[in-house]
Image (cartoon, grey):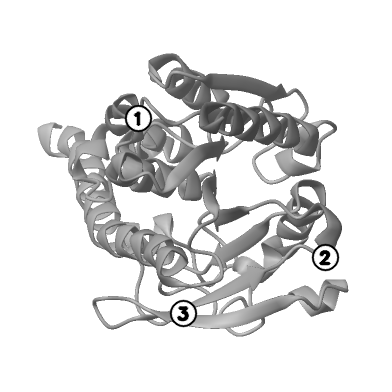
Amino acid sequence: MASYLRLPFLAGSSLAALFSGLLYFKQNDIIYPRNIPLGTRTEVPRPRDFGHDDYEELLIPTPDGESLSAFLIRPENKSRTRDVTMLMFHGNAGNIGHRVPIALQLQEDLGCNVLMLEYRGYGLSTGTPDEKGLMIDGQTALDYIGNRADIKHTKIVVYGQSLGGALGIQLVARNQHAGRISALILENTFTSIRAMIPSAFPPAKYLARLCHQVWPSESTLPSIQGIPVLFLSGLKDEIVPPAHMKQLYQICRAQRKIWRTLPNGTHNDTMLQENYFLYVTEFMDEVFTKIQQHRL
């Protein structure tokens, strides 16, 4: 009898050990699904595929030897161009080509340049993604803007979706006192990867401590104080619980922070919701009006 009673425990323990091993050693493949959707490593839509020809396709070298694919999109309407470059970080799947329509809408509404960065291991970039590497990638993109003659004097706005928001928080926190970044925009990002596990992978909720990809937004964001932050939260987000965004907003200590909700926005279509780009435009207008007033 005792031996039979032990079987479920032993089986459960074996499954737990197996799952723990998978979580620890395969978590990069789970967190950075760079091969989804099929063909995403080789098939990258270009701005010209959407009727926009004023852009450059770049390969930006990193200090650790990787090569990052990127698009530098310039505003089409030269009569209303702003002295702004938006540094755009996407979510954890797909490639920059899948987000070109977003970038084109931003350049049209705001009259700004948009630098779309492809993380290492994604799209046409070399390497393998992990937290440390992506932070190098973000810094490399920021430095690229600062070293390029035609855009180095532009005001930089960091825009991050989901995982890209976590990267944006780390980048802004590390560079906020250098006077290079003017604003931060966050969409549907999370407090930390470990905090995401109970909702994203319920069977692994007790194994969160094994997650070595941390992205500690909740502990980093409060250090950002002098840079305005816009929070865009899709209230029907089925991947990142909206409570994560609300918590980030509440702990944010920025002198100016703005909370905007998209009631029907899910994780991947929040930017398609009514007023999304209006909220971005209003935020940008406020930020740069204040910058101009400060200079007068």
- Estimate the x, y position of residue 189 in percent, counting from the top left: 50, 37
The residue wearing badge 3 is 125
Kindly state the secondary structure of the residue where label 3 is placed: loop
Kindly state the secondary structure of the residue where label 2 is placed: loop
Kindly state the secondary structure of the residue where label 1 is placed: loop
Rounded to the nearest whole Å, what is the CA distance between mark 1 and mark 2?
Answer: 33 Å
Quadrant including the C terminus = top right
Quadrant position of residue 174: top left
The amino acid beneath tag 3 is Ser
The residue wearing badge 1 is 224
- Estimate the x, y position of residue 214 in percent, counting from the top left: 27, 44
Q: Decide if residue 23 is on the left or right side of residue 250.
A: left
**Residue sitting nearer the eye, 46 or 243:** 46
Q: Is residue 196 visible?
A: yes
Q: Which residue is drawn at the image coordinates 71% and 67% (left, top)?
A: 74
Is the residue 199 above or below the residue 43 in the image? above
